[in-house]
Image (spheres, rainbow, N blue to C red):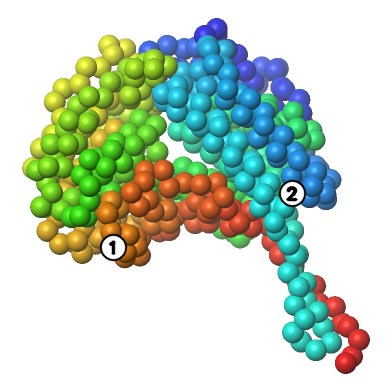
């Protein structure tokens, strides 16, 4: 891949390339630790100008007819699918893999999945109707959705295309305009999305400024009409404190601590296959990734053997190589962080299930690992791991396992494996989670709400609820002729 140099300041349809007063940051590939490009960062003045442009553009975009907004989103979806079909070192998927360390196939899948968000929200807007009531004699009531205004979209690095896509698609279809700040760690992939969207929407509807939170995010939080944020629970609290005085509505998709619960009637091989995806998708750096594994004591030995056989065969290496199962971790410090979580759980009485894994000599790589009988109080079990490791706890009483799932305070996703559908539904009903996978590791669908409770945030992305999160509703009462 050739060295890339991009601007992270795109306002009113124009790309700002003037470096005066702005700094450039290197784009480092976790695959080998080398720089492969750089990105121009914006300033506080850029952030303010982006907001002003988005605010001015709101009136015309919010009144754009529904069929035109729908057509725009479908055109964006089509362009994303075209991009996902391209292979080679100049492709978007190759860039995404190079920048984040995710497998090339997963990178292509992410771009394709991003297209589904734009189509799904187009479908949702087409289906949305004004409500009308004729209950009170002599008066009719109409309920109309209205676009909120300017939405600040603030996203992380782990899915730098699909997470911004689902947020921006929801805002655009609702009639909102956008100011967008992506994570520095995977900025180039997010900027490709900004540039693509700008081809289809009027200038000023989507404006991108990359930069420090103090320079970019803080000025927006003081002005925007809605905030859509994905990130850590810690940062979510900070943002909520900043927007509380203005009662700014927000969608907060925060941390997760998904339990993977196996019931005693489960097909062990099928459960292990599901776990391998739920744990190692995106190198384990997914907010809905399996975070702790709860298995019945009666299946412990067989489950252990099956999981050891499956996980021991994982190949760690260059994610652009088709033979690779696990790629590099994007943050440079994450391998040491994950290894520390494993070491602490072992020191507290757990047993490392997997032997040594051959790792590349350069880059940011962590070996996959499961810790049998990890203490429930260990960070590996009790907090979000965000890496290719997990603790395993054998339970004697299912209620104990469900209690552990509910006790963490998080409530984004969890999983259950069983051959009994009625038992699955009963367990799902006990989970403290907004997203539940029954015998599947891929529970997310853009047409359905995506969100959690407790420490995992508030509000929803995806589904009708994701559309309505960017709208407010007005009731119009009209006096009719007396009867």
Determine whether 233 is above or below 129 in the image: above
User: Which residue: 37% across, 34% down?
Assistant: 281
Q: Secondary structure at mark 1?
A: helix
User: Which residue: 59% across, 40% down?
Assistant: 116
**Which of the two residues, 234 or 99, is positioned nearer the viewer here?**
99
Q: Is residue 127 left or right of residue 154?
A: right
User: Which residue: 35% across, 30% down?
Assistant: 283
Q: CA distance from mark 1 to mark 2?
A: 43 Å
Which residue is label 2 attached to?
175
Which residue is label 1 attached to?
423
User: Which residue: 74% across, 84% down?
Assistant: 135
Which mark's residue is nearer the viewer, 1 or 2? 1
Q: Is residue 111 left or right of residue 359?
A: right
Note whether residue 217 is visible.
no
Residue 107 drawn at (x, y percent): 48, 26
Residue at the top extreme of this rendering = 2
Quarter of the image with the C terminus is bottom right
Residue 468 drawn at (x, y percent): 64, 57
Residue 329 drawn at (x, y percent): 36, 26
- Mark 1 or mark 2, earlier in chain: 2
Residue 306 drawn at (x, y percent): 17, 36
Q: Secondary structure at mark 2?
A: loop
Place residue 482 in its image quadrant. Answer: bottom right
Q: Is residue 460 left or right of residue 127?
A: left
Q: Residues within 10 Å of mark 1 (few under 14, many from 20)?
A: some
Determine whether 89 is above or below 304 in the image: above
Q: Residues within 10 Å of mark 2 (few under 14, many from 20)?
A: many
Determine whether 43 is above or below 383 in the image: above
């Amino acid at each position: 891949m050739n060295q890339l140099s991009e601007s992270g300041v795109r306002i009113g349809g124009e790309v700002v390339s003037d470096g005066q007063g702005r700094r450039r940051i290197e784009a480092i590939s976790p695959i080998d630790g080398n720089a492969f490009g750089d990105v121009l960062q914006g300033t506080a003045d850029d952030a303010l100008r982006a907001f002003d442009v988005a605010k001015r553009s709101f009136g015309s975009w919010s009144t754009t007819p529904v069929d035109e907004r729908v057509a725009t989103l479908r055109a964006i979806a089509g362009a994303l699918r075209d991009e996902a079909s391209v292979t080679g070192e100049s492709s978007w998927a190759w860039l995404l893999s190079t920048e984040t360390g995710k497998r090339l196939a997963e990178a292509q899948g992410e771009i394709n999945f991003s297209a589904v968000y734009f189509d799904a929200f187009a479908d949702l807007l087409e289906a949305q109707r004004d409500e009308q009531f004729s209950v009170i004699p002599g008066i009719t009531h109409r309920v109309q959705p209205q676009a909120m205004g300017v939405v600040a979209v603030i996203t992380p690095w782990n899915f730098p295309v699909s997470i911004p896509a689902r947020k921006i698609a929801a805002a655009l279809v609702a009639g909102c305009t956008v100011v967008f700040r992506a994570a520095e760690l995977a900025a180039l992939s997010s900027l490709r999305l900004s540039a693509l969207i700008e081809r289809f929407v009027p200038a000023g509807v989507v404006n991108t400024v990359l930069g420090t939170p103090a320079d970019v995010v803080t000025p927006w939080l003081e002005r925007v009409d809605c905030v859509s944020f994905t990130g850590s629970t810690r940062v979510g609290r900070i943002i909520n404190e900043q927007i509380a005085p203005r009662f700014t509505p927000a969608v907060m998709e925060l941390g997760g601590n998904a339990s993977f619960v196996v019931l005693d009637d489960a097909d062990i091989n099928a459960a292990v296959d599901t776990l391998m995806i739920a744990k190692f998708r995106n190198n384990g750096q997914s907010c809905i990734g399996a975070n702790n594994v709860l298995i019945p004591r009666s299946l412990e030995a067989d489950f252990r053997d099956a999981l050891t056989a499956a996980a021991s065969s994982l190949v760690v290496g260059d994610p652009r190589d088709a033979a690779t199962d696990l790629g590099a971790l994007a943050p440079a410090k994450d391998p040491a962080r994950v290894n520390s979580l494993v070491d602490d759980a072992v020191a507290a009485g757990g047993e490392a299930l997997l032997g040594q894994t051959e790792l590349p000599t350069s880059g940011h790589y962590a070996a996959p690992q499961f810790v049998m009988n990890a203490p429930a109080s260990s960070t590996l079990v009790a907090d979000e791991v965000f890496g290719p490791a997990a603790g395993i706890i054998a339970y004697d009483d299912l209620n104990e396992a469900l209690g552990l799932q509910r006790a963490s305070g998080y409530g984004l996703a969890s999983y259950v494996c069983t051959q009994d559908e009625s038992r699955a539904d009963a367990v799902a009903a006990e989970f403290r989670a907004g997203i539940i996978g029954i015998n599947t590791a891929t529970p997310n669908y853009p047409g359905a709400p995506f969100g959690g409770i407790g420490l995992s945030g508030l509000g929803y992305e995806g589904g009708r609820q994701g559309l309505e999160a960017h709208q407010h509703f007005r009731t119009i009462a009209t006096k009719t002729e007396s009867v």
